[in-house]
Amino acid sequence: MKKCKLVMVGNGMAGVRTLEELLKIAPALYDITVFGAEPHPNYNRILLSPVLAGEQTLEEIVLNPLDWYAEQRIALHLGKKVEHVDRVRRVVRAADGTAADYDRLLLATGSNPFILPVPGNDLDGVISYRDIADTSAMIDAAARYRHAVVIGGGLLGLEAANGLLRRGMQVSVVHLMPWLMERQLDDTAGKLLQKSLEERGLRFLIGAQTKALVGGAEGRVQAVQLADGSEIPADLVVMAVGIRANTELAERIGLYCERGIVVSDTLQTITDPRIYAVGECAAHRGIAYGLVAPLFEQSKVCATHLAQFGIGRYAGSAVSTKLKVTGIDLFSAGDFLGGNECEEIVLSDPTAGVYKKLVVKDDRLVGACLYGDTVDAAWYFKLLREARTIADIRDKLMFGESNIGDTGHEGATRAAAMADTDEVCGCNGVSKGAICRAIKDKGLFTLEEVRRHTKASGGCGSCTGLVEQLLMFTAGGDYSAAPKKKAICGCTDSSHHEVRQAIRELHLLTIDSVFRRCGWRTPNGCASCRPAVNYYLLSTWPKEAKDDPQSRFINERSHANIQKDGTYSVVPRMWGGETSASELRRIADVVDKYRIPTLKVTGGQRIDLLGVKKEDLAGVWRDLGMPSGHAYAKALRTVKTCVGSEWCRFGTQDSTRMGQALERALWRMYAPHKVKLAVSGCPRNCAESGIKDVGVIGVDAGWEIYVAGNGGIKTEVAQFLCKVKTSDEVLEVAGAFLQLYREEGWYLERTVHYVARVGLPYVKQRILDDAAGRKVLWERLQFALDGEPDPWLEHARAGIDARQFDPVAAL
Amino acid sequence: MTALANGWRAVCRIDDIPRLGARRVARAGAVPIAIFRDAEDRVYALLDRCPHKGGPLSQGIVFGTSVACPLHNWTIGLDDGCAKSPDQGCVPRFAVKVEGDVVSLDAGELARSNARGPMECSSRPSPHVSNAAPDEARRR
């Protein structure tokens, strides 16, 4: 078969990334030809600043060496600028006459620096700061001349100024606006930045307008003249006043352009379906993105269409800026300037070089500007994107996510201060050195990529902030973005919310029907989405939807916890943590009979039999004669209790009976994630009710109910929901809250994250203000649990495939 | 079970394996074999030991032509035994024959596999015989 021909114009990061994605999924579909105007293979443009500052070499920032193009059999034309495209005959022609036919054309022409229209802008020594040639010209000038002027106090301008300063030049920065980096920083942060850069030796002319560039005897620039008539000596002028999408070629060949080449959600130009555009030259829904992460998202989507899969849509990205100007951490996102009807929460510590401003509107975080300490940037960005109410955490907001508790990396918050051997990710044992090496060697740019390659932050996620900092140091500042809507997994574009909604509104009862209605691209999903969809079906339509054991994780399929050696653990249920002599005797006999190696008391007041062979599970359950403890399931685990008023001299309520009543009412309850309860008989709280999904504390006049606590990765203290008088009320409130979570929570979302997402006021409104609604929720839960079988003792009714316990054959 | 010609040994009927599921074939003194059945009723056999930390692949969730290891969620291809990028490693795979509804493994190959290194990774696709057209195009 004759291969299709793909031609790419532009050899930069977004374009080559698209080719890489394409070659991954359809390696043999195209004969590929690439035209690049620069005489270099694809390199990391973000790292030009370290090259200028002398910290890295040009060789080190190359992303795809020439060998790569050869291995991929890509015909590479370097240093050849494409002048024309004949869209009828489908031929691309470069300035030197080189031509290439195409079936598909990919435009990745990037952007051009904006050159101020002032007299003298074409003099020798006047350059922009965009590519390797500019960088080399600066390095060269620094060796021969003394005075440099940078026009533009944005990120690029400041990086250029810093680099030239480091190379020994005297540098002045001319900036038209009232403070530096006005598009990323507010005035306070901008002025802090100016002060700290002045201390390093940079000179600033703020609010100054360039009128002309004055030339000397040999046609080289000699001075910059400002609008007020003053002149600054300059042997080198760097213009860094912004970039414009490079649409020159696209316009010449009649493609519709606005801010960039206008493309659809499939990255196809709206003018010619054979032509695609990605990167800084493309305008998607009116936005031309300049950050790496959104551009790589585009690359991914574009590749699937070039591969003729016809899947994936690019729906735009929410963007934040997290960057580093010469060693100073900066972050901003959203409406960080505030103003009308906004409130501001500000922390300012000039001596320590820290300034943080959070902009709040209608109880929601709408903007953030951080200077000097950006460790919580990812958290603020998440709050901003999810637009969740912050009323309940307002008093803690400024102090960041870590003040709630952080484990696994010794509480480190500054990645720069860590040694290469220090562990960043405590879950997967990944060191700082390993992460930095992977970022460098494999050319990683996004958190997601670092996670896939190193597993760092892929466990509990509490080191995410550190990993992001490492990405910034190693790959450059410009990576932070997130899709506007998060899909369940790579099989679909639908979000958890959309899938739940479809199941409810369309009365869907099978996984297949969900996959069809919600646009799954894979025939039978994956290990992430199938358990989620199975849970959504069962929790939305109890007694109607049928469980699919093959869509459950092994623990829920075999009703025991798999261990690292492939054996299982068995935790029988002990109501409220109370047991008896006969139960203990049976447990002891089972341990002897099946030679179970380890017997352990758990944190939830149960006994764990560890190291049971799979073929022994059914026998162990039968001989124990105790109900399933569901320690293996996303379900109600345990209700922990203290002894309470029956024995305790301080007890005010019978917490053990209360806990047992709760456990009997709620056991067999599957949920988006595990659910743990506790009941304490007095405020001394010996059952640790303060860190449970539902915590109940007995007081003299009744019971206090707390919700959404968590003792895990981040210790989260449960929040007070209400106080009630009777144990029946405890059952109804706790049950209604858990049913709400069951119906609205996303799979693998703990109650703490569910409540954080919807806000405690919403929960109070549904559970406390709406008494009738509360009763309905509680009744729905009772309906769902009524008559549910015990999986350990009623295999057939519980739909357990008992064949799994034995080998199918022995050879 | 019955020994057939060419060393094929019948191990079960196809319906003994749940669709999108797996069963184990025990072996005296050796790691068991995991036999998988996909949505199209194709059957695959791999050594029941993940190349990562030795997890029993037979206990994982089967989707498409892959299985997710139950211990750390590595994804292993059923037709090549190899971990999905960027993870690296392969598990030995074995020939499977489905005739009528009888699933057979090659006893000779199993015996030889005891002798060779458990993590060996070959680029040759494993012979795969089924009652469907053998060269039927694989779905992506």
Image (tube, rainbow, N blue to C red):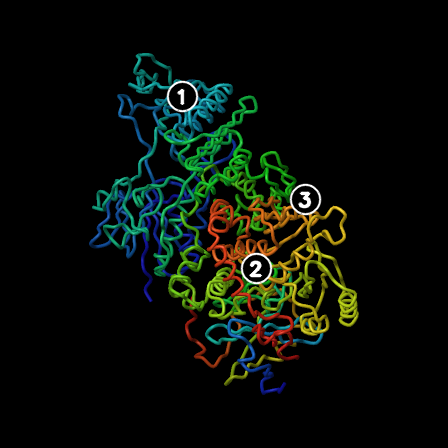
Locate residue A311: give its quadrant: bottom left
Q: Residues within 10 Å of mark 3 (few under 14, many from 20)?
A: some
Same chain for the residues at labels 3 and 1, yes or no?
yes
Front of the two marks 3 and 2: 3
Residue under label 1? A173
Residue under label 3? A683
Q: Position of residue B108 (x, y in %)?
A: 62, 79
Q: Chain of mark 2?
A: B
Distance of label 1 from label 2 (alpha carbons)? 53 Å
Q: Chain of mark 1?
A: A
Q: Are marks 3 and 2 in contact (CB under 8 Å)?
A: no
Q: Position of residue B13 (x, y in %)?
A: 55, 82
Residue drawn at (58%, 82%), measured in percent from left and top?
Answer: B12
Distance of label 3 from label 1 (alpha carbons)? 63 Å
Distance of label 3 from label 2 (alpha carbons)? 42 Å
Residue under label 2? B73
Residue A497 got which mark?
Answer: none
- Mark 3 or mark 1: whose residue is earlier in sequence: 1
What amino acid type is highlighted by mark number 1? Answer: Val
Q: Quick check: B67 above or below A463? A: below
Q: Position of residue A84 (x, y in %)?
A: 24, 45
Q: Residues within 10 Å of mark 2 (few under 14, many from 20)?
A: some
Locate residue B136: give its quadrant: bottom left
What amino acid type is highlighted by mark number 3? Answer: Pro
